[in-house]
Image (spheres, grey):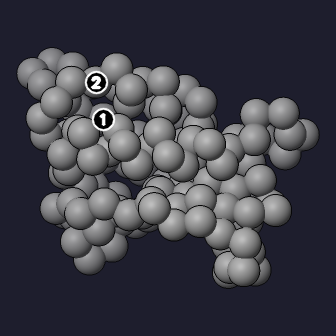
């Protein structure tokens, strides 16, 4: 997956969905933020299995796909980046966030196929 977006849009989206992650769970997957890039949008998801939060932003999607990142770490990193263009690139095992010249953040990805099927939670969700 690869997309380019505005840093402020990314910051806002991650801050909103991070409230849906659960850091006190025995299921580590629920600590993650799922990212799905398709068309000209990127959607961020978080759930605690009782409800889920999603936020969609516009982006220049170069390669469609999905990734699952550790929510708390990802949110803390994104909150500290500056304004401007962000390039997000991921594979099955890692993600790179490029912002500014020579400023890259590297993350290990969690297995996205283990993330809960959000269709079953549709009745209890919040979209921003």
Residue 91 makes an appearance in the image: yes
Closest to the observer: 121 or 92? 121
Q: Say the numbered circle drawn on residue 80.
A: none
User: In terms of depth relative to the viewer, which is nearer, 116 or 6?
Assistant: 6
State which quadrant residue 85 falls in: top left
User: Is disc 1 surrounded by few (<14), some (14 to 19) or many (20+) residues within 10 Å?
Assistant: many
93 lies left or right of 37: right
Residue 72, position as x, y percentages in the image: 59, 30
Q: Would residue 50 be found to the left or right of residue 67 on screen? A: right
Q: How far apart are marks 1 and 2 (CA)?
A: 10 Å
Q: In this view, does 106 lie to the left or right of 53?
A: left
Query: Marks 2 and 1: in contact by CB < 8 Å?
Result: yes
The residue that appears at 16% across and 62% down in the rendered structure is 60
Q: Residue at x 24, y 55 (%)?
A: 3
**Residue 7 position in % (x across, y down):** 23, 39
Which-is-in-front pick, marks 1 and 2? 2
Task: Give the residue at mark 1.
Answer: 97
Q: How many numbered circles are shown?
A: 2
Which residue appears farthest toward the right when viewing the image?
A: 26
Which residue is more in the foreground, 123 or 41? 123
Earlier residue among tags 1 and 2 = 2
On-image quarter of the C terminus: bottom left
Residue 12 against residue 37 in the figure, above or below: above
Quarter of the rendering occupied by the N terminus? bottom left
Q: Where is residue 90 in the image (x, y as percent from the top left)?
A: 38, 48
Q: On the image, numbered disc 2 is attached to which residue?
A: 81
Q: Label 2: how many residues lie within 10 Å, few (<14), some (14-19) or many (20+)?
A: some
- Inspect this view and state whether residue 32 appears: no
Label 1 residue SS: strand
Q: 23 above or below 41?
A: above
């Amino acid at each position: 997956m690869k997309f380019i977006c505005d840093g402020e849009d990314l910051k806002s989206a991650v801050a909103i969905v991070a409230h849906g992650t659960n850091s006190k769970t025995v299921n580590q997957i629920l600590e993650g933020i799922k990212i799905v890039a398709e068309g000209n949008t990127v959607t961020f998801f978080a759930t605690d299995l009782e409800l889920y939060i999603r936020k969609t932003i516009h982006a220049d999607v170069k390669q469609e796909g999905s990734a699952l990142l550790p929510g708390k770490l990802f949110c803390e990193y994104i909150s500290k980046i500056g304004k401007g263009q962000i390039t997000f690139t991921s594979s099955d095992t890692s993600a790179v966030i490029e912002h500014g010249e020579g400023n890259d953040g590297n993350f290990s990805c969690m297995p996205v196929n283990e993330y809960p099927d959000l269709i079953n939670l549709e009745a209890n969700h919040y979209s921003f």
